[in-house]
Amino acid sequence: MLSKMTLWDKILICSLIIISVAWLGLAVLFGTKDEAKVIEIKVNGNIVEKLLLTEEAANTYSFKFGENTGFIEVKNGAVRMLEMNKDICPEEICSKTGWIKEEYETIVCMPNGIIVNIKSNTNNQENDIDIDVVA
């Protein structure tokens, strides 16, 4: 097949490859930075906390649900639910979920109605956020 190609065919193919690689390089070099992410904690469908999530953030935060207190850990741009007393959460599925850092991941504690989501902060409404998570 290469023997049937003319010199101009080969130049065209090489040019397209070079342009594609250059375009990809420019997209990586000048690409947009990740949008700010927000940790949203809901208890029984009501938002109880919103925390700004950054790569530099590293801390433990508490939130109330009913008579109890839950704890989440934030580190390296990810969040996880810390272990609760077995009387409060007998299966411990929420703490066994582990770290989440993407919007499509969720931590759920069904016995207590707790949902921890990560959402993009596209509208940048700083007044919506309860706690600004910083290092």
Image (cartoon, rainbow, N blue to C red):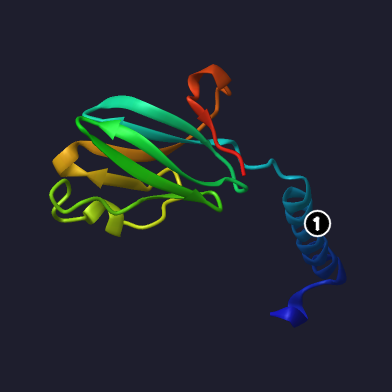
Q: Residue, x 28% and y 38% (percent of image)? A: 69
Q: Is residue 119 left or right of residue 108?
A: right
Q: Please name the residue shown 40% across and 33% down the image.
A: 40
Element assignment for label 1 = helix
Name the image quarter holding the N terminus.
bottom right
Residue depicted at 34% across the width and 34% down the height: 63
Question: What residue is disc 1 on?
Answer: 22
Q: Is residue 31 above or below residue 42?
A: below
List x then y, in percent, for residue 114: 25, 38
Q: Quadrant of the C terminus?
A: top right
Residue at x 81%, y 70% (from the top left corner): 10
Closer to us: 12 or 45? 45
Q: Position of residue 102 (x, y in %)?
A: 46, 48
Callout 1 crowding tier (Cα within 10 Å): few <14, some 14–19, many ≥20: few
Residue 48 against residue 34 in the figure, above or below: above
**Residue type for callout 1:** Ala
Is 74 situated left or right of 69 in this image?
Answer: right
Q: Specify whether residue 105 is in view.
A: yes
